[in-house]
């Protein structure tokens, strides 16, 4: 009985978390659900988010920086024909297409937080500044959590049966 109560409570907490928490708007861009996984100081962290561009022109994200890491790089992961996952640095930036979006998500584009200066613990926030081609800078906070945000899975809340 006690066990059932705990499970029900957990489900209620998950369902009441607002899907739009942590979204940022800068001009025509919306930065959705930035997050990162827990990691220890001295290790590398990985940051994820979705950047949507409602404007009529493509926007290039040139680079990113963070006070919690020695350096931030943008990478893309890809699976080769023999099933080996490899990462490539995107030093020329990542283009957010006009009227489109780019998902930085596990298995694809991501931000490498190289040389963490502090641990990333669940529930904390890690600031990252995004620097765009027009010189615009956007500061977002990555929520530290072990699992991807619900919104990133593309599942409407009403489908979360338990
Ligand atoms: Cu990487």
Image (cartoon, rainbow, N blue to C red):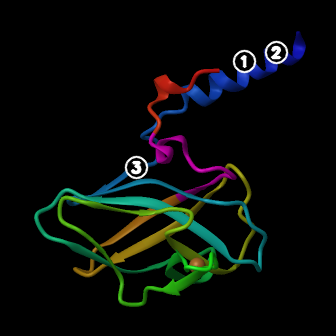
In this view, 66 is above or below 146: below
Along the line of sight, the residue nearer the viewer: 5 or 27: 5
- Give the class, few, some or many, for how many residues have Cα within 10 Å of label 2's Cα (few <14, many ≥20): few
Left or right placement of residue 31 versus residue 115 in this view: left
87 drawn magenta: no
In this view, 27 is above or below 86: above
x, y (%) of residue 42? 77, 80
Q: Answer with mark 3 or mark 2, whichever residue precedes in sequence.
A: 2
> What's the residue at 40%, 73% (across, down)?
130
x, y (%) of residue 17? 54, 32
Q: Helix or strand or loop: what does disc 1 sit on?
A: helix
The magenta span reads 142-154
Q: Answer with mark 3 or mark 1, whichever residue precedes in sequence.
A: 1
Q: Which mark is residue 4?
A: 2
Give the residue number, with chain letter if any, for mark 1.
8
> What's the residue at 42%, 65% (across, down)?
139
Can residue 52 be spotted in the picture? yes
Left or right placement of residue 92 versus residue 127 in this view: left
Give the residue number, with chain letter if any, for mark 3.
23
Q: Which mark is residue 26?
A: none
> What's the residue at 64%, 79% (across, down)?
84
Q: Are marks 3 and 2 in contact (CB under 8 Å)?
A: no
Q: Residue furthest left?
A: 56
Q: Quadrant of the N terminus?
A: top right
């Amino acid at each position: 009985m006690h066990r059932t109560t705990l499970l029900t409570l957990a489900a209620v907490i998950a369902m009441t978390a607002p899907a739009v928490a942590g979204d940022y708007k800068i001009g025509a861009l919306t930065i959705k659900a930035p997050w990162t996984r827990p990691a220890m100081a001295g290790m590398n962290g990985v940051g994820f988010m979705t950047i949507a561009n409602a404007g009529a022109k493509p926007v290039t994200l040139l680079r990113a920086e963070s006070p919690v890491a020695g350096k931030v790089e943008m990478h893309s992961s890809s699976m080769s024909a023999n099933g080996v996952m490899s990462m490539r640095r995107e030093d020329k930036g990542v283009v957010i297409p006009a009227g489109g979006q780019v998902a930085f998500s596990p298995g694809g584009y991501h931000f490498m937080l190289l040389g963490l200066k502090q641990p990333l613990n669940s529930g904390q926030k890690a600031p990252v500044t995004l620097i765009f081609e027009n010189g615009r800078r956007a500061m977002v906070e990555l929520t530290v959590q072990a699992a991807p945000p619900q919104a990133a899975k593309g599942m409407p809340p009403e489908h979360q049966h338990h």
